[in-house]
Image (spheres, rainbow, N blue to C red):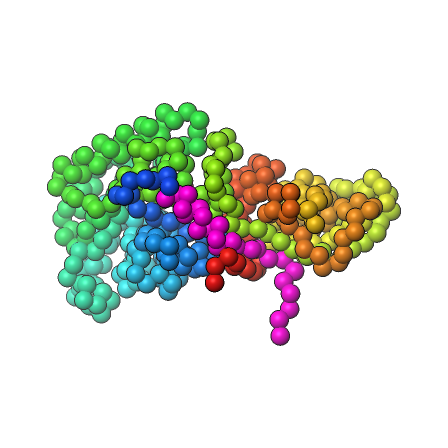
Amino acid sequence: MRSIHTAWAEIDLKALRNNLAQVRRRIPGRNTQILAVVKADAYGHGMKRVAKVLAKSGVQFFGVANIDEATELRSVCPTQRILVLGSFHASQLPFFIHYRITPTVSSVEDVQVLSRFLKSDLTHDSRLRGNDNSRPFPVHVKIDTGMGRLGVWHEDLEQFFSVLKTSPNLYVEGVYTHFSSADKADKKFTRQQIERFRKAVQKIEALGIRPKYFHAANSLGLLRFAKAHLNLVRPGIILYGIQPDKNIANVPGLKPVLSLKARVSFLKSVKKGASISYGASYITPQATQIATLPIGYSHGYRVGFSNKAFVAIRGRKYPVVGRVTMDQTLVDLGPRARVCRWETVTLIGRDKNINISAEDLASLIGSIPYEIVCSIHSRIPRIYKGIR
Ligand SMILES: Cc1ncc(COP(=O)(O)O)c(C=O)c1O
């Protein structure tokens, strides 16, 4: 027996493949590979299904935030490379090693903890790495060129690499950096980060270290700075068909992957002057019909949308009225709408000529579209379409 969903997210896997093709078009050289960023449950789209489709389309690298995401991803991507973009704790190292997950190394302390563990691993539990335990363990070194987050400061590389060189059980497979301002109209700071990274790479090579991968570009890095493509790019948001920044010209060809939908769960006719929802912040200006949608801030449909956002039903726009509550949201249909109970409502996505984007919703509340899609709670089922 199956009941209907009353609030759900539709994930269009064909659109995902389209966006991957758009990324590929923008890195024309054969030498640049793609590391798809699928952290935060693939920005709310469902990491496992998204990664499976991308892997089937030839993506060989994935980036996640932590070891828990990495081990979950390993179950659907048995052969692909998985890089943890966040930091690690010593207690997580057996999982990195057992599941062949690549850690990001950002400090002398990271090198020492990892190297010490690998030594003990070899002596105490060789089962952990199977036949691999005689080979150096691959890591990616992060260099901070101006983000101020993880990474070895680009001017402190000598000391860091002098310690790393005394750890023969580690292999620097990659070095990377992250841009803080690739969205700024003024490209100066990102250019400076690229230059700092270029010099860092020169220094590393002069020390006799030969990484296989160099990477820097997030979505806007790859769209706006060809010099940052190097031999690996790390797109996230554009794979999901979302325009990365409202101040940068729209990227043509992207198709939004996620739509958020709900059904009208209740309809009520009210008189002029009726107060709607907590705080009575909306008073009906005329006799009207109020629709209840069974979705609220506990699902990620934000309180900030109260009296600001619109939804679409049968290709027409209707305003969200009164305060969005924990699990219900109210919409003013006007006096003449012929909307039925249990009809489908689009909260994010396209309905005929009406388009409600994550970008639009973000603008309403001074947020960014990343936050809008990442906030959609796991209680909202993801329904996949487009590819079996
Ligand atoms: C280190 C790193 N690389 C790449 C990305 C992908 O960024 P975007 O989604 O802007 O493409 C992220 C996302 O936050 C990140 O943290």
Direction from residue 378 to residue 81 in the image, left or right: left
Q: Relative to 186, is 274 above or below? A: below
Residue 264 visible, this angle: yes
Residue at left offset 25%, top offset 51%: 139
Residue at left offset 21%, top offset 36%: 201
The percent coordinates of residue 270 (x first, y second) are 84, 49
Residue at left offset 18%, top offset 63%: 133
The percent coordinates of residue 256 (x first, y second) are 52, 46
In reply to whether residue 21 is colored magenta, the answer given is yes
Residue 327 visible, this angle: no
Residue at left offset 22%, top offset 59%: 117
Along the viewing direction, whichever of 348 and 157 lies nearer the viewer: 348
Q: Relative to 347, is 149 above or below? A: above
Q: Quadrant of residue 143?
A: top left
- Residue furthest toward the bottom? 1
Direction from residue 122 to residue 56 in the image, left or right: right
Along the viewing direction, whichever of 27 and 209 lies nearer the viewer: 27
Along the viewing direction, whichever of 380 and 65 lies nearer the viewer: 380
The percent coordinates of residue 76 (x first, y second) are 38, 63
The percent coordinates of residue 118 (x first, y second) are 20, 59
Along the viewing direction, whichever of 249 and 366 lies nearer the viewer: 249
Direction from residue 54 to residue 369 in the image, left or right: right
Picture quarter with the N terminus: bottom right
Q: Which residues are magenta?
A: 1-24
In reply to whether residue 147 is colored magenta, the answer given is no
Query: What is the total number of numbered labels drawn onto the structure image?
Result: 0
